[in-house]
Amino acid sequence: MNCALITGGSKGIGRAIALQLARDHALHILINYASDTVSAGATMNKIAEEGGTAELLQFKVEDKEETDRSLDQWQQKNPDKFIQVLVNNAGITRDGLFMWMPQNNWDDVIAVSLKGLFNVTQHVIRQMLKNKSGRIINISSISGLRGVAGQTNYSTAKAGVIGATKSLANELAKMNITVNAIAPGFINTNMLSNLDMEKYVKTIPMQRVGEPEEVAHLVSFLASGKASYITGEVININGGLYS
């Protein structure tokens, strides 16, 4: 059985991606989450209500040992299952001006977005390489392309995701494994709760924020056979708010 692993898949963009991949591709969905069991369970139940299948994988992507242990245990219990699609979506924000940024706010953001990508991807590509097949889709951000004041840590992490995407795409292309990144702009999730969106919406040509489902449709396309010749790309989805 082919599966899709979505890191940070319990809510927001991650939840929308999990639901869309189950709908469009009949993939068994692995919902990774760090701590919010209630939200993760709600995502799993929603997939089941729509006729799909899913299970929960709780581990902190930034912890290499925990990541390896969880994925090893899952593979041992499910020798007939293959993670065909990996979506590196996990990310956090700890905004603040660089001059006064606590070191842990820098370290935590880099660890989840960037080290998490390393930890999960390095493990999952083993089976992809054996099968000579796979789709890796990394969720970056417009912040990683243009830089945002007060988000030096987040912009750095998401820019790193783009660099990793391009390099890994070159390494894996001959093995029929594609690696692409998506760079969302302002998307209607909890990450916007502390922002004055009335001000920011005026800067968006489409005059609105995006919805998680719109990002999910793009992920679904990149996971499909229709995108088999696309790799190493960074696709903006931001209502015209280009970098």
Image (cartoon, rainbow, N blue to C red):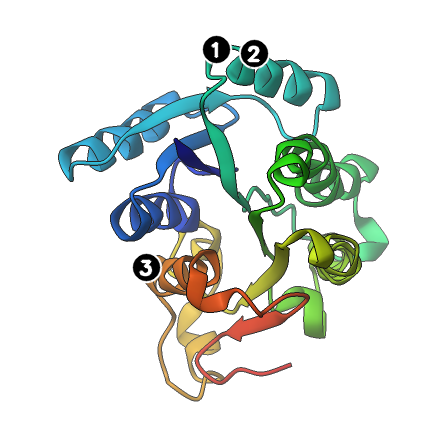
Q: Which residue is mark 3?
A: 213
Q: Secondary structure at mark 2?
A: helix
Q: CA–CA distance between discs 1 and 2?
A: 6 Å
Q: Amino acid at mark 1?
A: Lys
Q: CA–CA distance between discs 3 and 1?
A: 32 Å
- Give the vertical position of 7 relative to 138 (above or below): above
Earlier-in-chain disc, 3 versus 1: 1
- In the drawing, what numbered circle is on residue 170? none
Q: Which residue is mark 2?
A: 73
- In the rendering, at what x and y percent does residue 211 appear? 34, 63
Instruction: Answer with the quarter of the image where residue 220 lies.
Output: bottom left
Image check: 17 left or right of 231?
left
Q: Which residue is mark 1?
A: 77
Image check: 215 left or right of 203?
left
- Mark 1 in CB contact with mark 2 (< 8 angstroms): yes
Mark closer to the observer (1, 2):
1
Residue at image x 42%, y 36%?
A: 2
Q: Secondary structure at mark 1?
A: helix
Q: CA–CA distance between discs 2 and 3?
A: 31 Å
Image check: 136 left or right of 14?
right
Residue at image x 42%, y 31%?
A: 31
Q: Amino acid at mark 3?
A: Glu
Residue 148 in sight here? no
Instruction: Name the one closer to the observer, 128 or 169.
Output: 128
Instruction: Answer with the quarter of the image where residue 14 lies.
Output: top left
